[in-house]
Image: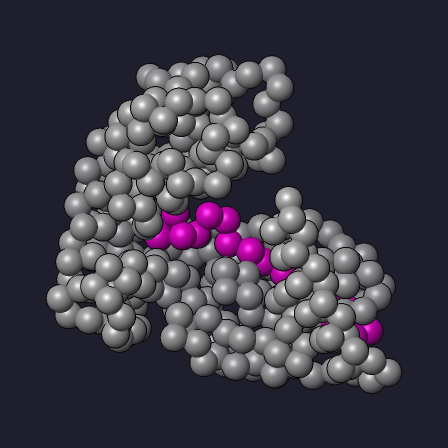
Amino acid sequence: MVLQARIEMGKAEGLRRALQKIEGQPRVYPNMLPTQASLRWSTTQPPLVTFDKRFWKQSLILPDPDEFWVEGDWSGIEARIFTAQTGDEEDLELFRRGADIHTFTCAKYLMAWAPNLVPSSPIEDYHLPDDWEGSKDARRVRAKNFRYGVLQYGSGAKAVLTIPGIETLGLDRLALVGRANRFLNARPRAVAFKQKVWEDCVKEKMARTFMGARRMLWSRPEDRAKEGLNHKIQGAVANMMNWCLIEILVNREPHTTRLILNKHDGMILGFKLSSWSVDHAMKLCRSVFEKEWEFDGISMAFPMEWETWDHTGERKKL
């Protein structure tokens, strides 16, 4: 609790300093710097990505009267990219069907309420408990961490024991490791893919995304393996975002659109009211950001959650 309080105090102090620097200015133009080794962008002066959401929902950050903004956030894109590059059928089928992959993981593997689930199972077969709270349920959150921490980035089944808050599930260590092993055994292609990426990154001191973006790896062998796999997944997200932004802002509509914020797996675009309706803008955005991508013969689309708002601050989820 003390550590968390210190973290929150540090965030609040950083925000105070950022606001102090722009106090009294009627209009601010942030700097956008696509300079990070991870391919992520930095937005500074002020650091908008770290701004509390209330500033985007009230009166500090708003569109001009002659435009509206469209905000999009990719849903579970890292898990989708990892699955598209590995190809284990259960996860591919879950994404094809639009199932909630983290609820499935929770019910079948982590909590094992329904160990015989298949991707086509109806939700009543998940045997979710009466106190289930949907996407915010703490057990689903642990299952999401379980998927990322054990399968995607972890070194093996025992990585489950290091997941923050895993002890709150009331499961003993042997049970947790056993369930993690069952989860990994059901994904042999993902395990083999991860092992090969690790070995290649250690040997070659380099990693590339599926789009070819290179990152050199100069650290210790174990760190090269981790950083290389991160780049293949998280760097791919940045690659895709950059491609989509260039497609809209440069290739298609350079004079009537502008970039408000790039936040790695999401963005905010501004559209001129004199040239665009919301429906027209959304048709363009969906066609670019939700297109299918090819990964060595596997096609994967990447859905986004969408929201629009105008200079009055009125927001609408789409």
Q: Name the quarter where the N terminus is drawn.
A: top right
Residue 68, x across and y down, in percent? 73, 67
Q: Which residue sits at x=58%, y=58%? A: 72
Residue 218: say if magenta.
no
Inspect the magenta stretch and tell me whether residue 64 lies in it: yes
Q: 188 or 158, which is in the foreground?
A: 158
As drawn, 230 above or below 300: below
Q: Report the residue that reaches farthest toward the left.
A: 203
Q: How is the image coloured?
A: one colour
The percent coordinates of residue 55 (x first, y second) are: 77, 63
Is 70 left or right of 117, judged from the image as shown?
right
Q: Quadrant of residue 129?
A: top right
Is residue 309 visible in the rendered image? The answer is: no
Query: Relative to residue 118, is residue 73 depicted above or below?
Result: below
Q: Toward which corner of the image does residue 292 lie, by quadrant?
A: bottom left
Residue 277, position as x, y percentages in the image = 70, 64
Is residue 299 or residue 216 the one in the foreground? 216
Specify the quadrant of the image occupied by residue 47: bottom right
- Asked if residue 185 shows in the view, the reply is yes
Left/right placement of residue 257 relative to residue 169 reads right
Q: Residue at x 82, y 61 (%)?
A: 58
User: How many labels, in total?
Assistant: 0
Measuring 46% from the left and 19% from the top, which residue is drawn there?
126
Viewer-proximal residue, 213 or 164?
164
Residue at 27 percent across and 70 percent down: it is 219
Q: Position of residue 250 (x, y in %)?
A: 50, 81
Q: Is residue 161 above or below residue 258?
A: above
Range covered by the magenta-colored residues:
62-81
User: Of 92 and 32, which appears nearest the observer?
Assistant: 32
